[in-house]
Amino acid sequence: MPLKKPFIRFWRFLERENLDSLFWVIVGLIGVGTITISWFEPNVKFYDGLWWSVVTLTTVGYGDISPQTALGQTIASIIMIIGYGIIAVPTGIVTAELSQTYRKEISTQACPECSAEGHDKDAKFCKFCGSHL
């Protein structure tokens, strides 16, 4: 059970309100990938490392730059797996939000002013004209 708490903290970090933080995590991962691949791979300059890091993290993988050393290939594997997670998490959040909007309960109460229907169950004001329900 000791693994449950860190996992919950990590998941809360990736909630909808923290997507701006996810952006900075992505920028940090690109920076770390750039520095490490430029440092450990022979004949890879900083800008080539930046290009490689972005292409690898976004899982595009052009193949114009590929690590030759075992350490470079290990770093590439880690960045690729993290890239899949970075793509999957925001997609899951958007999907959950969209499905949740369709599940809202709608009342059949009509507005006394404009006679519009389709308000949320807990609505106190008409969403079309603004009058009190």
Image (cartoon, rainbow, N blue to C red):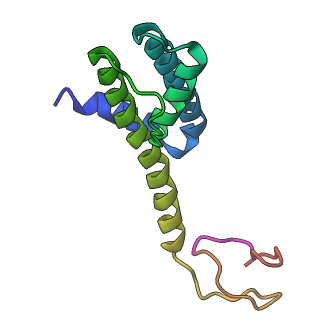
Extreme-left residue of the structure = 1
Position of residue 61 relative to residue 50, above or below, is below
**Residue interval drawn in magenta:** 121-126
Q: Is residue 28 magenta?
A: no
In the image, what residue occupies the spot 19% across and 26% down?
2
Quadrant housing residue 119:
bottom right
Foreground: 50 or 92?
50
Foreground: 28 or 116?
28
Quadrant housing residue 127:
bottom right
Percent x, y of residue 64? 48, 33
Q: Is residue 123 magenta?
A: yes
Extreme-bottom residue of the structure = 115
In the image, what residue occupies the spot 32% across and 30% down?
77
Percent x, y of residue 6? 31, 28
Foreground: 80 or 108?
80
Quadrant housing residue 70:
top left
Position of residue 122 relative to residue 96, above or below, is below
Percent x, y of residue 47? 60, 19
Predominant secondary structure, magenta span: loop
The C terminus - image quarter: bottom right
Foreground: 95 or 103?
95
